[in-house]
Amino acid sequence: MAEDADSGTNQPILLRADADGICTLTLNRPNKRNALSDGLLDALQDALDSIAADKSVRVIILAGNGPVFSSGHDLNEMRAGSGYGQIHALFSKCSRVMAAITRMPQPMIARVHGIATAAGCQLVAACDLAVASSDARFAVPGVTNGLFCSTPAVALGRAVGRKKAMEMLLMGELIDAETALSFGLLNKVVAPDDLDAAVMEYATSINGRSTMTMSMGKAAFYQQMDMELDDAYEFASDVMARNMQEHDAHEGIKAFLEKRPPEWKGR
């Protein structure tokens, strides 16, 4: 049975807080280093499904309670059910969560502190934006335990260049936040005391945009990334032409020309 509370705190393993269009999801297994247990993956999937249909949410922040963002999969849980069927089901569930993040109509920002390793690093790579404190560390260390991080490699390989992704996957060593920034895994690195303000700077900016435009643009961006160049341009031209037929595109242009704030209709 999937857990719904952390045994050490009797608190929900995933917290949700909404304020003025910004939804914050907080991994809440601090005593387990926010390991992505079967129950936490279920909670994440349920929350993402709910938020995707919630038109009042314009942007999502993903955070972690305690000293660690997320250490990845719960290794004790994996050892307890290590048969092929059980392990395949676990990784498939995790993969669905990661894919759901990419397919969310709302942009999603990772707020990273402490460490983000294995599937925790995968979470960071899957989010649209990522801001980290300067003391954060990142790794996909499966090779050190005899288990190559093949599923984290899917998101990681799409977020950073192939050579840098393979460097992380083959070495399995922790890299610091500045290195992760240079690899392309992060958008910004700030002092620990400035982390919340930096995340909110992104969230507040996105929150002021048209939800219709953001959702259409996000979906198109990820879809065209896997296309050949000519196909990508043909597809993107169609998307922009359809975008231009929407109320918010006309309103945004009109507001710009009239030098006033736009009044978005949204998705």
Image (cartoon, helix red, strand yellow):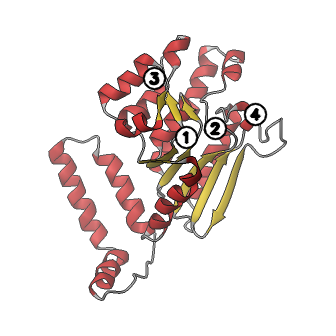
Disc 1/disc 2 C-alpha distance (Å): 7 Å
Give the residue at mark 2: 41
Question: In terms of sequence position, does the residue under pointer 2 or pointer 3 come before the other?
Answer: 2
Task: Please provide percent x and percent y for residue 241.
Answer: 24, 67
Tags 1 and 4 in contact by the CB under 8 Å rule? Answer: no
Outermost residue on the bottom side: it is 258
Disc 1/disc 3 C-alpha distance (Å): 16 Å
- Which numbered dot is residue 254? none
Q: Amino acid at mark 3?
A: Ser
Label 2 Cα crowd, 10 Å radius (few <14 / some 14-19 / many 20+): many
**Is 59 rendered above or below residue 133?**
below
Q: Nearer the viewer, residue 29 or 197?
A: 197
- Which numbered dot is residue 97? 1
Task: Please provide percent x and percent y for residue 133.
Answer: 53, 44
Single out the mark in the foreground, 4 or 2: 4
Disc 1/disc 4 C-alpha distance (Å): 22 Å
- Residue at 64% across / 21% down in the picture? 86
Outermost residue on the left side: it is 230
Label 4 Cα crowd, 10 Å radius (few <14 / some 14-19 / many 20+): some
Give the residue at mark 4: 31
Tell me, yes or no, if residue 2 can be seen here: no
Single out the mark in the foreground, 1 or 4: 4
- Residue at 50% across / 56% down in the picture? 198
Give the residue at mark 3: 150
- Residue at 18% across / 52% down in the picture? 233
Disc 3/disc 4 C-alpha distance (Å): 26 Å
